[in-house]
Image (spheres, grey):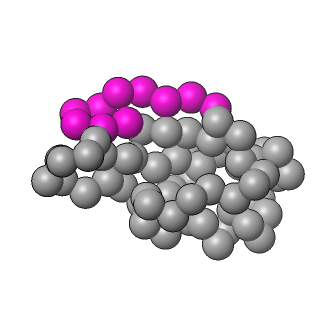
Amino acid sequence: MECEACRELIGKPENVERHAGLAAFTSRKVQRGWQEMYMCRACGSKLQRVIMEPGSEQSGAPWTKAG
């Protein structure tokens, strides 16, 4: 179960910064951007977002819980 800070982040736009309890877990290159995954030190949840490279006409993906 997600902690309150993780629940508040899920569904927010990708440009919303992570909360202090999220630690970088992994990232991978996607077309014109990066998929970033983080793990919460408080509750163990994994959250992800997609950040697009500057100049890209596409938008990223909002914060979601990683399956």
Residue shown at the point (85%, 51%) measured from the top left: 42
In the rendered image, the residue lying farthest to the right is 42
Q: Is residue 37 visible?
A: yes
Identify the image quadrant of the N terminus: bottom right
Residue shown at the point (43%, 66%) measured from the top left: 13
Q: Is residue 67 visible?
A: no
Location of residue 19 with respect to 35 vertically, above or below? below
Location of residue 1 with respect to 39 vertically, above or below? below
Count of picture labels: 0
x, y percent for residue 3: 79, 63
The magenta span reads: 25-34
Q: Is residue 58 left or right of residue 63?
A: left
Residue shown at the point (37%, 47%) measured from the top left: 51
Question: Is residue 29 inside the magenta stretch?
Answer: yes
x, y percent for residue 33: 30, 38
Q: Is residue 16 left or right of residue 56?
A: right
Residue shown at the point (49%, 69%) measured from the top left: 12
Question: Is residue 13 inside the magenta stretch?
Answer: no
Q: Is residue 18 left or right of residue 55?
A: right
x, y percent for residue 46: 65, 45
* Magenta stretch prevailing secondary structure: strand
x, y percent for residue 43: 82, 52
Where residue 67 sits, quadrant-wise, is top right
Which one is nearer the viewer's eye here, 53 or 47? Answer: 53
In the rendered image, the residue lying farthest to the left is 57
Where residue 7 sits, quadrant-wise, is bottom right
